[in-house]
Amino acid sequence: MSRHTDLYRLNRLLDRMERQLPDWLVRILRWLRAPSSRWIRVPLGVLLVVGGLLSFLPLFGLWMLPLGALLLALDVPLLRRPARRGTLCAERHYVRWKRERRARREMDR
């Protein structure tokens, strides 16, 4: 699979994710995904990855690691496929969790 195919698939996945997010977050994500934002996106991605590695400290969290990797994957071809696969896996878990939660609520009624 080529680098361009991985980038295309990652962008399609991010487009699909945007439809689930609130408008204010979509605006930020679109701005970060713009080619002109590369000089902000790369350092921010590195900072988020480092912050995720420092998750044992109270100010940082493990959530920062995948978010930073996802931002870096837009510019680093080597990270595109693992980021896409990880995001798809997280999406599947989220959908399953949501479905189970809805089923539990219906059973409680």
Image: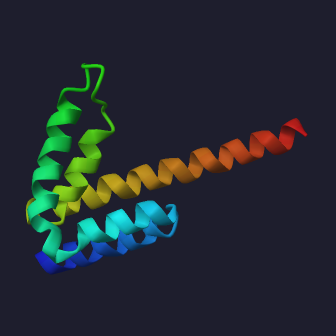
Q: Quadrant of residue 72?
A: bottom left
Residue nearest the observer in this picture, 44 or 106: 44
Q: In this view of the protein, can residue 23 be seen by the observer?
A: yes
> Residue pushed farthest top?
57
Q: Residue at image x 18%, y 66%? A: 74
Q: Residue at image x 20%, y 34%? A: 51
Horizontal relation, residue 44 to residue 60: left or right? left
Q: Residue at image x 45%, y 62%? A: 24
Where residue 9 appears, as percent x and y from the top left, is 29, 74
Residue nearest the observer in this picture, 95 or 46: 46
Quadrant (top left/top right/bottom left/bottom right) for the N terminus: bottom left
Where residue 56 appears, as percent x and y from the top left, is 25, 19
Q: In this view of the protein, can residue 79 be seen by the observer?
A: no
Where residue 3 appears, as percent x and y from the top left, is 12, 75
Residue 20 higher or lower than 87, as above or below: below
Horizontal relation, residue 44 to residue 87: left or right? left
Where residue 26 appears, as percent x and y from the top left, is 42, 66
> Residue pushed farthest right?
109
What colour scheme has been applied to the protein in the rendered image?
rainbow
Q: Quadrant of residue 35?
A: bottom left
Residue nearest the observer in this picture, 93 or 25: 25
